[in-house]
Image (cartoon, coloured by chain):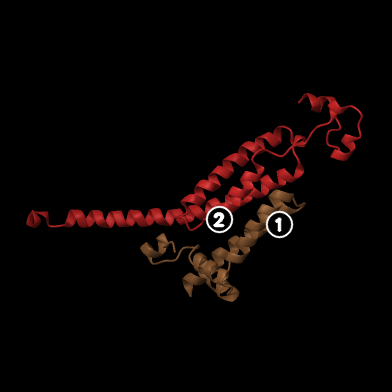
């Protein structure tokens, strides 16, 4: 934060900053934390759509949570992070949203199926003529 | 091969059904058979390959390309799934 106040022209691209003589005023841009992980998890969430939808939901939600935390960091000071990693994060977030929604639809089908099976088995259990069986 | 949970329980194929058969056909070299079984397999493999390359070498527009590849792949997977269900 102190570096920002010392250097008001901090949005100049990296080449011009390196020409400045004082080394303390150079803002070293770094990658957003977890940006690559968010991208990988977001893309894998749709590739693993066949695992009952559950694995896709888990991966997608992890990616969304990580992306939310990193977005907060970016909002605090956006010029500390490289542009490429910010783009990675945004793309990964979109992928995670799509993957999570599709996986959750699949997962809902499994849950509905289990509920129907459970209800059918339950009714058959209660309707069975236990007096004659026992 | 790993049996599908949906196919064995519901008699409905899931969006990932056919991926293993398509992969086997692809490894045998039958490109057209693989596309017929699971059209999204080759784009998905390409997307993962591109993702690894992008993370290693940091292409300039890599994130945007990956985003559009992802949306295209999802469309192909869902479209092929409904085509398979209703035909």
Circle 1 residues within 10 Å: few <14, some 14–19, many ≥20: some
Residue B25 higher or lower than B50, as above or below: below
**Residue pictured at 78% horizontal, 23% vertical:** A2
Residue at 51% x, 67% y is: B81
| Disc 1: host chain | B
Closer-to-camera residue (B50/A89): B50
Q: Which quadrant of the structure image shows residue A73? A: top right
Secondary structure at badge 1 equals helix
Quadrant (top left/top right/bottom left/bottom right) for the N terminus of chain B: bottom left
Q: Position of residue B29 (x, y in %)?
A: 59, 73
Residue B19 vs residue A43, the one in the foreground: B19
Q: Are marks 1 and 2 in contact (CB under 8 Å)?
A: no
Q: Which chain has been coloured brown in this picture?
A: B
Residue A44 place in picture, x, y as percent: 57, 53
Instruction: Find numbered disc 2 in the image and state the secondary structure of the residue it sits on.
Output: helix
State the residue at coordinates (55%, 48%).
A60
The chain in red: A
Disc tally is: 2
Mark 2, other Cα within 10 Å: few <14 / some 14–19 / many ≥20: many
**Circles 1 and 2 on the same subunit:** no
**Image quadrant where residue B64 sits:** bottom right
Q: Residue at x 42, y 66 (%)?
A: B12
Q: Which residue is mark 2?
A: A46
What's the distance in space between the residues labelled 1 and 2, CA to CA? Answer: 16 Å
* Left-right relation of A24 to A80: right
* x, y percent for residue A96: 59, 49
Q: Which mark identifies residue A109?
A: none
**Residue lying farthest front?**
B28
Q: Is residue B21 in sight in this rendering?
A: yes
* Residue that badge 1 annotates: B65
Place of residue A98 in the rendered image (x, y in percent of width and height, measured from the top left): 58, 53
């Amino acid at each position: 934060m102190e570096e920002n106040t010392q250097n008001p022209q901090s949005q100049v691209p990296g080449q011009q900053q390196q020409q400045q003589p004082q080394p303390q005023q150079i803002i070293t841009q770094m990658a957003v934390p977890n940006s690559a992980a968010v991208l990988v998890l977001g893309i894998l969430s749709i590739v693993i759509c066949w695992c009952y939808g559950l694995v896709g939901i888990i991966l997608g939600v992890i990616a969304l949570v990580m992306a939310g935390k990193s977005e907060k960091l970016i909002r605090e000071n956006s010029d500390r992070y490289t542009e490429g990693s910010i783009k990675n994060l945004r793309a990964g977030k979109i992928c995670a949203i799509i993957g999570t929604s599709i996986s959750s639809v699949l997962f809902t089908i499994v849950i509905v199926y289990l509920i129907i099976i459970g209800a059918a088995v339950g009714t058959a259990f209660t309707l069975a003529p236990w007096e004659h069986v026992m | 091969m790993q049996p599908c949970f949906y196919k064995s329980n519901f008699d409905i194929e899931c969006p990932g059904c056919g991926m293993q058969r398509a992969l086997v056909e692809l490894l045998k070299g039958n490109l057209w058979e693989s596309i017929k079984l699971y059209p999204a397999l080759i784009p998905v493999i390409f997307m993962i390959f591109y993702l690894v390359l992008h993370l290693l070498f940091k292409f300039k527009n890599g994130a945007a390309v990956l985003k559009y590849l992802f949306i295209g792949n999802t469309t192909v997977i869902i479209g092929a799934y409904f085509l398979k269900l209703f035909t």
